[in-house]
Amino acid sequence: MSKVLDFIPDDGYTENAFIASIPRVHNDVRFTFRPMLIEDQTKWMNKSSKLKDDVWTQNAATMLAERIKSWDIVDQDDKVLPLVVKHLLMIKPALFMRLYGIVLGTDASDVDPNWGDEEKLKIAMLHSKSIATGVNPGVVREVEDLKN
C-alpha cells in the first residue's frame, strides 16, 4: 500500500480510493487516481456548470478517464474493463457520481477494509474535518498540506 501524503507533490501523484458496495446497486470498487488541485477544481466546476446535461456527462467521463489510473470494475466475464470514456458512461449512475466526487475532491473515499491502520486513520480524519468544517474533502486535504 502506498504512503498517504497530506499534499499533492506533483501532477503524476496518485492516491488509492475505495467505494463501498451498495447492495443491489454496485460492488466494491478500488481505484487509483490523480487528485485535482483546488485551482483545477474551481476551473472545472465553473466551466462544467455552463454545459448542457449531455455535454456535461461526456466531459465528466473524459475528465475521469484522464485522472483515474486504474480500477477493478469488471465485465460479465470477470475481466477488468479498459478505463475508457465509453465504459465510464456505461457504469451505474450512483457509482459514476461517487467516482466523480472523489476525483473532483468534493467527496472522500470510503475506508477500504484492506488498507493499513495509517491509511484508514488518514481517511477518517479527512472525513471528520470535512464534516466539522462543512468544507469539501479536496479543500480540507489542501489546507492540511499547507500546514506541513
Image (cartoon, rainbow, N blue to C red):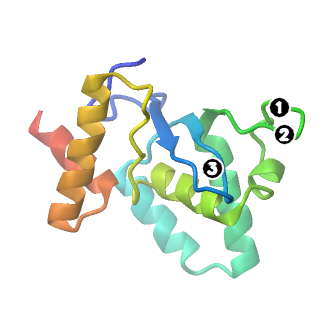
Residue at the outermost right position: 77
Mark 2 vs mark 3, CA separation in Å: 19 Å
Instruction: Identify the secondary structure beneath mark 3.
Output: helix
Q: Which residue is drawn at 57% across and 49% down?
A: 21
Instruction: Identify the secondary structure beneath mark 2.
Output: loop
**Is residue 38 or residue 79 the one in the foreground?**
79
Total labels: the figure holds: 3
Write down the residue under mark 1. Answer: 78
Instruction: Identify the secondary structure beneath mark 1.
Output: loop
Q: The N terminus is located in which quarter? A: top left
**Amino acid carrying mark 1 in the image:** Asp
Q: State the image coordinates of residue 84 (x, y, percent, origin top left).
A: 78, 43
**Amino acid carrying mark 3 in the image:** Leu
- The image quarter containing residue 134 is bottom left
Q: Do the residues labelled 2 and 3 touch (CB within 8 Å)?
A: no
Q: State the image coordinates of residue 43 (x, y, percent, origin top left).
A: 46, 63
Q: Which residue is drawn at 57% across and 35% down?
A: 31
Nearest to N terminus: mark 3 or mark 1: 3
Q: State the image coordinates of residue 79 (x, y, percent, origin top left).
A: 83, 29
Mark 3 vs mark 1, CA separation in Å: 22 Å
Q: How crowded is mark 2: few (under 14 residues within 10 Å), some or many (20 or more)?
A: few
Write down the residue under mark 3. Answer: 64
Q: Residues within 10 Å of mark 1 (few under 14, many from 20)?
A: few
Q: Are marks 1 and 2 in contact (CB under 8 Å)?
A: yes
Q: Residue at x 34, y 22 (%)?
A: 116
Write down the residue under mark 2. Answer: 75
Q: Is residue 148 left or right of residue 138?
A: left
Q: From the viewer's perspective, is the residue at label 3 or at label 1 nearer?
A: 1
Q: The C terminus is located in which quarter? A: top left
